[in-house]
Image: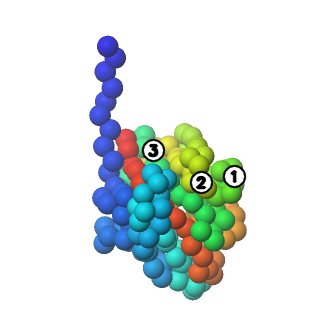
Amino acid sequence: LAESSARTNRIDYSQDCTKAAWSKTRIGTVALDSVGPDGQENSAATVTADGTAGQHYISQARVPDSTKTTLSVYAKAGSFSFIHLLVTGQNIYAQFDLSDGSIDNSSSGSGTLHSTTAEEIGNGWWRFSLTATQTSGSTQHLRIYGLDSAQAAAGPSETSSSTLLVYGAQVES
């Protein structure tokens, strides 16, 4: 029998980004009020930008240094058109179109971006992921942005009050 290493999700409250473990930047509201990809009422969060100019995201400091790590999240378009996953510090990111799952922009910054994936789950839900290795520095943040338009930037910025549905964020090494 082949042995496999145990994987642990490093995200606290991965199913509930309304909790204080999740930092919120220029986010007006986060409400656990939507049907998730599991079909359960109130299992997915609606993240709403606050309408001001700047970067709009939720984040957690859970990306280990110098380890090949996969970041993933289930997402569905509210009124945002794109989702942007970023590992801070070394600016490793991938940006996906919420309508068809296509990868719009990606960059390895000063780390290594191994892969990006988009898997259609059904009912408008997608599972988006990126696998990357940081080359130096301390524990970094995973940021999840919603965007109205595609932007080729590690920290995209715009004025928005749009929404994004999120569920089940994971960071695994």
Q: Amino acid at mark 1?
A: Asp
Give the structural element (helix, strand or loop) at label 3: strand
The mark lying in front, picked from 3 and 1, is 1
Residue 88 visible in the displayed image = no
On residue 44, which mark appears? none
Residue at the spot of label 2: 123
Residue at the spot of label 1: 100
Separation (CA) of disc 3 from disc 1 = 21 Å
Q: Is residue 91 above or below residue 159?
A: above
Residue 85 at x, y percent in the picture: 53, 57
Q: Is residue 69 above or below residue 41?
A: above
The mark lying in front, picked from 3 and 2, is 2
Residue 149 at x, y percent in the picture: 70, 68
Q: How many marks?
A: 3
Q: Amino acid at mark 3?
A: Thr
Q: If you read the primary sequence from the N terminus, does the residue marked by circle 3 or circle 2 appear first?
A: 3
Query: Left or right: where does residue 103 sit relative to residue 134?
Result: right
Residue 11 visible in the displayed image = yes
Instruction: Classify mark 3: residues with Cα within 10 Å, few (<14), some (14-19) or many (20+).
Output: some
Q: Amino acid at mark 2?
A: Asn
The mark lying in front, picked from 2 and 1, is 2
Of 151 and 98, which appears nearest the observer? 98
Query: Left or right: where does residue 54 sit relative to residue 101?
Result: left
Separation (CA) of disc 2 from disc 1 = 12 Å
Residue name at image x 32 percent, y 13 percent: 1
Q: If you read the primary sequence from the N terminus, does the residue marked by circle 3 or circle 1 appear first?
A: 3
Query: Left or right: where does residue 67 sit relative to residue 57?
Result: left
On residue 70, which mark appears? 3
